[in-house]
Amino acid sequence: MLKCPIYKRCGGCNLLHKTYEEGLEEKKALIASLFQKEKLVGFPTHICGMENPTRYRNKMQVTFKREGRKTIGGFYEENTHRVIDLEECFIHSELLNNIATFLPKLIDKLHLSAYDEDRGSGLIRHALLKEGFVSHEVMVVIVTASEVFPGRSEFVKELRQAFPAITTIIQNVNPRKTSIILGEKERILYGPGWISDTLCSLRFKITSKSFFQVNPKQTEVLYGHVERMAGLKGTEIVLDAYSGIGTIGMILSKKAKQVYCVENNSDAVRAGISNAKDNKITNVQFFCDDATHFLNAIAKNNEHIDCLIMDPPRTGSTPSFLDSILKLKPKKVLYVSCDPTTLVRDLKTLIPTYQIIDSIAVDMFCWTKHVETIVCLSKKQA
């Protein structure tokens, strides 16, 4: 068991009071109970844990607040907007921890103001930190309440001197009264505006807004099982829905005839197209579109899909998207889920037409109650 000084207040790692093995068993039991409750056959009997379940996160979000005569930076206390002064977080890398604890000191040194939610005043709201675990490149995104950033050149200079590993710094402007961290407008203060990292032997550009799995080591385990379950022979047409920057689709492309990646975030699509080009992949095509709309359109045109990959957000898929799957009728559906509750809910819609032929759980979010699950469904014979 790890001893975290802010464990009881933070609530992020809600399984730290157990051993790691006990936490794995709890996750496996949760998935099994949800499947059994709905009488779904084929729930995962194995969960892939980590050999060393610490320092695994490549992304960190820090919030700033003025407390007395100094600025503090840390995480929100569970179910509140009270900021906990960060000492150390064991699930983030040592480098990200060091940057996170340095930033409040730099804010005070340059006489910048932390944003006050209640008054709607102040400048520095959040920091978003991303790290390439293979490339060792680091991105720092400073979220400000206005475009005016006094002393930004000095801010960049001091930050780079303290941490030479930082390869890009971005100012993101979020003037709205909202709990959403990032705003729409950005300005690159240093570097190319993105970092890159290697996953499953492919190189990916990662932007401030593009989705990239937070646990690189376990992501390779996860995608290895996706590739195994897909069982591609080189003749199949694959559709990667909710594709983000195209990680799954590009990884499967080496064993597919053609891959279509569908994503409604234009920044992620641009990054995906660039990623495919950089990796010299020619059989992946990106579409900036709503996944449901895209599926309905190709179903209407009687286009053929052999394997559909879906990796929706924690809220799960939508009834309209699931209905579009039933219209399209791909031979195989791989559902990659980060919430077993919404997974089971969605599977109930698909089960009359599909049957579960394989499943496995992967511990992507060690010490938390969250778990990643892959379910492979095959279309029933008429």
Image: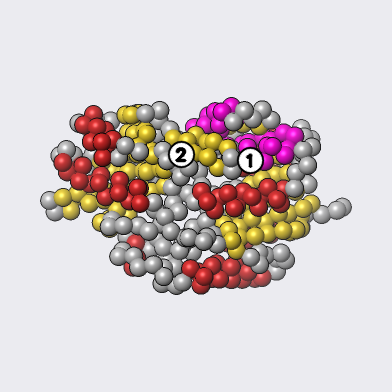
Is 47 magenta? The answer is: no
Above or below residue 50? Residue 177 is above
- Display coloring: secondary structure
Q: Nearer the viewer, residue 304 or 334?
A: 334
- Can you give x and y, in whole percent of width and height, for residue 364 in the image? 52, 56
Residue 103: which quarter of the image?
Answer: top left
Q: Residue at x 73, y 38 (%)?
A: 256
Circle 1 — which element?
Answer: helix
Residue 345: which quarter of the image?
Answer: bottom right
The answer to whether the residue labelled 2 contacts the one labelled 1, judged by CB atoms less than 8 Å apart, is: no
Q: Residue at x 25, y 36 (%)?
A: 161
* Crowd band around label 1 with a 10 angstrom C-alpha radius: few (<14), some (14–19), many (20+): some
Name the main secondary structure of what is drawn in magenta: helix
Identify the amino acid type marked 1.
Ile
Q: Residue at x 19, y 49 (%)?
A: 71
Residue at the spot of label 1: 251
- Report the Cα–Cα distance between label 2 and label 1: 18 Å
Is 275 magenta? The answer is: yes
Q: Residue furthest left?
A: 69
Task: Give the magenta part as a residue range.
Answer: 249-278
Q: Nearer the viewer, residue 17 or 330?
A: 17
Q: Is residue 112 visible?
A: yes
- Can you give x and y, in whole percent of width and height, for residue 48 in the image? 59, 61
- Can you give x and y, in whole percent of width and height, for residue 309 in the image? 66, 45
Of the image marks 2 and 1, the number of the one nearer the N terminus: 2
Q: Nearer the viewer, residue 367 or 76?
A: 367
Circle 2 — which element?
Answer: loop
Residue at the spot of label 2: 135
Identify the amino acid type marked 2.
Ser
Above or below residue 153? Residue 102 is below
